[in-house]
Image: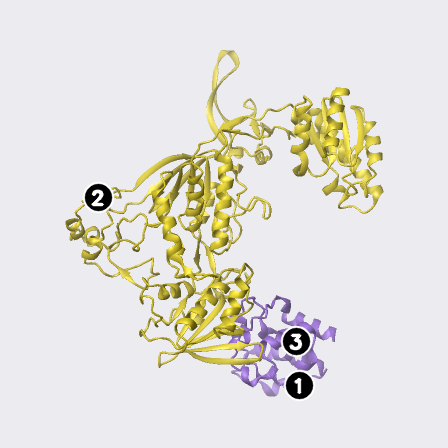
Amino acid sequence: MRRIGVFVCHCGTNIASTVDVKAVAETLGKEPAVVFATDYPYMCSEAGQNIIKEAIKEHKLEGVVVCSCSPRMHEATFRKAVASAGLNPYMLEVANIREQCSWIHKDKEEGTAKAIVLGRAAIAKVQLNAPLTAGESPVVKRALVIGGGIAGIQTALDIAEAGYPVDIVEKEPTIGGKMTQIDKTFPTLDCSSCILTPKMVECSQNENITIYSYSEVEAVTGFVGNFSVKIRRKKRYVDETKCTGCGICTEKCPVKNVPSAYDLGLKNHRAIYIPFAQAIPNVAVIDADYCNKLTKGKCGICSKFCSAGAINYEQEDQIVEEKYGAIIAATGYNPISLDGYDEYAYSQSKDVVTSLEFERILKADGPTEGHLERLSDGKQPKTIVFVQCVGSRQSADAAHGGCGKEYCSKICCMYTAKHAMYCREKYPDTDVYVFYIDVRTPGKNYDEFYRRAVEQYGVHYIKGMVGKVAPQADGSLMVQASDLLSNEQLHIKADMVVLAAAIEPNKSARPLATMLTASMDTNDFFTEAHAKLRPVESPTAGVFLSGVCQGPKDIPETVSQASAAAAKALGLLAKDKLSCNPCVAHSDEMMCNGCSSCANVCPYGAITYSDKEFRGPNRTTLIRRVASVNAAVCQGCGACTVACPSGAMDLKGFSTSQIMAEVDAICK
Amino acid sequence: MADLKEQVLRTSGVNPLKCMRCGKCSATCPSYDAMEYHPHQFVYMVEKGDIETLMQSESIYKCLSCFACLERCPRNVEPAKLVEAVRLAVIRQQGQNHLKPEQIPAMLDEDLPQQAIVSAFRKYSK
């Protein structure tokens, strides 16, 4: 029997007010294996830790039980203390008598009795603890950023500036993301392109950054510090190394009816195109669905005009394989589909547009060259109605074909105020209405911005929703809405209606999360490791979150989070080796029957099977299929130990015998 | 009064606390101008327990039961069901048999579905 020491913490009055700590120490001191037991107001303090260290030496302790707060709080502290006194750090057990005892009980007698039982269980467990040593795994000093919007760009720049190589994978032909499509940014109204394009150029010029544009992540294997990623570089039919971005091909191509994704389909470009003037990389791409040469085999005009000889109709997809230490998801968002909202007549009228389409109308390189015009007849609208919360803040059981989102999209109040202000500023003869449920503008200089729209620019903010938009024969739009404060139903003859559509995570995020084994919420936003204290890390080690893929946010917030994610990733890349958690699963090969139950339940892909030779009776050799656990990938969740039908799987530090000993001690 | 609110909530199956006061029901209502109390007020009055005022109002008979409010409500509050529940509360409150079994034979008509008679009998008799 091991020599055990028990240390009971008061945690000020947190524990001591509902647990008689002296009685706990005294009772546990009488347990057969316990050679020393004491209590102290703050066991985690320097003085408290010294009590543990001295007792280990003085009483030659072989196991330590600390009765205190949750092990999530101070297990690491006490392990360090135990190790500094020469004991293996895994010969420590923490009995949680705060969160699971004193905080939830009112009766002191009951609390004390329970604390004693919890202490006994820990004593029983520590008897069976084995000394464990943490292994080490190397860190590949290269980061992968998935998504090349402002979030991905900022994260990549910060990592590159710190001196580590970083690759950006962007599925579109150019980096830049949504911010390239936006005209002005709130609350300062500076031009979006003017602040973004220098950063895009910086990305292309920084020698630590490699941009894989028009590429997608195809497979991810490995683990923190050592991910192995396959990237598919989609064929763009243009040799990226030869194309100079002169743009002659995009003028000579005879196919003129290709809807521009950059312009949300409001404008067309040729079958060979560069998304916009400041694209990075500034390289053309052929849309294979429209190109005459690729669909009919006849044409080849772009190839004839290309002086660089960059056009290659035979180009194939390429697969790049690279190793990374850290992966940062920055997959961004899209506005939701408005198919479920017939009442707003979005599909019936060209003059009912989403806010992102409105940005394109306002922007100089958009379909109207920056003039505020109706898309139906090119006339300048005199009355514009903005509708907020289209699809946001909608309960899951509401109608609208399941298009709605329960969350607030967060950015709409501000960009609508921006749009409304812009209209009044540039076209003062325009009547602008904003229908809102609540105006939500927290943030530095944000509420002031919205008030300016009302007070200085005379935008009509009306508390209420629009119920119906009906296109009229004369081309106008009849808007039926409620004004809740004056308690009347309004009928406004508008020329244009702008819908602040909810935003949702990019559709590519879900399959990516599966590849990364990173968890997501029901809305397909990536989950953080801790909502408050670890907001830029995924619970999956080595995966970090940047931008809207984690939750709705505006540009300043996205950039802050992007830099935070970079800082966290750099903390990982700066290490040469990672020490692994030694509390991992291992398989007893003699008992394993090769059924794959464990591999099927493992959420981290840590278990592999291989055929191994075993010595059989009478000098025979048997070949059996057995499981083995990659200790660097295993997170010690224990799912495999439960699934294993033959009892071959066990978890170090939480073995079946240890847990049964705890249960026995509790039931005694 | 609390009983009346309870009765309306139970017959309608509506939870007025789901309402976020956006007013889309009233924005969408085709008989808005004919009503003294508009759909969004209806929801709020039921929430406050002010059922008797609603029962005395002509508004409950102006509702067309077109269910547009119910279809377009972003929180799935279903105001039209509340209107119907208040109408039922009026009928029940008077404690009269609006429809007696002996009246039924005279009403029978071969085009009238049996189901309509049964449901009318359930609704209007005590």
Residues beneath discs 1 and 2 located on the same chain: no
Q: Is residue A327 visible?
A: yes
Q: Is residue A456 left or right of residue A166?
A: right
How far apart are the two marked residues, 1 and 2, measured between alpha carbons?
A: 87 Å
For residue B126, the mark is none
Q: Is residue B125 visible?
A: no
For residue A314, the mark is 2
Q: Is residue A378 above or below residue A39?
A: below
How far apart are the two marked residues, 3 and 1, measured between alpha carbons?
A: 39 Å
Q: Identify the amino acid type marked 1.
A: Glu
For residue B45, the mark is 3
Is disc 1 placed on a helix, strand or loop? helix
Tell me the shade of chain B: purple
For residue B102, the mark is 1
How far apart are the two marked residues, 2 and 3, measured between alpha carbons?
A: 70 Å
Judging depth in this view, the residue of A98 and A562 nearest the camera is A562
Tell me the shade of chain A: yellow
Q: Residue B43, image x and y in percent? A: 62, 73
Of the image marks 3 and 1, the number of the one nearer the N terminus: 3
Q: Identify the amino acid type marked 3.
A: Met
Is disc 3 placed on a helix, strand or loop? helix
Is disc 2 placed on a helix, strand or loop? loop
Q: Residue A208, image x and y in percent? A: 38, 38
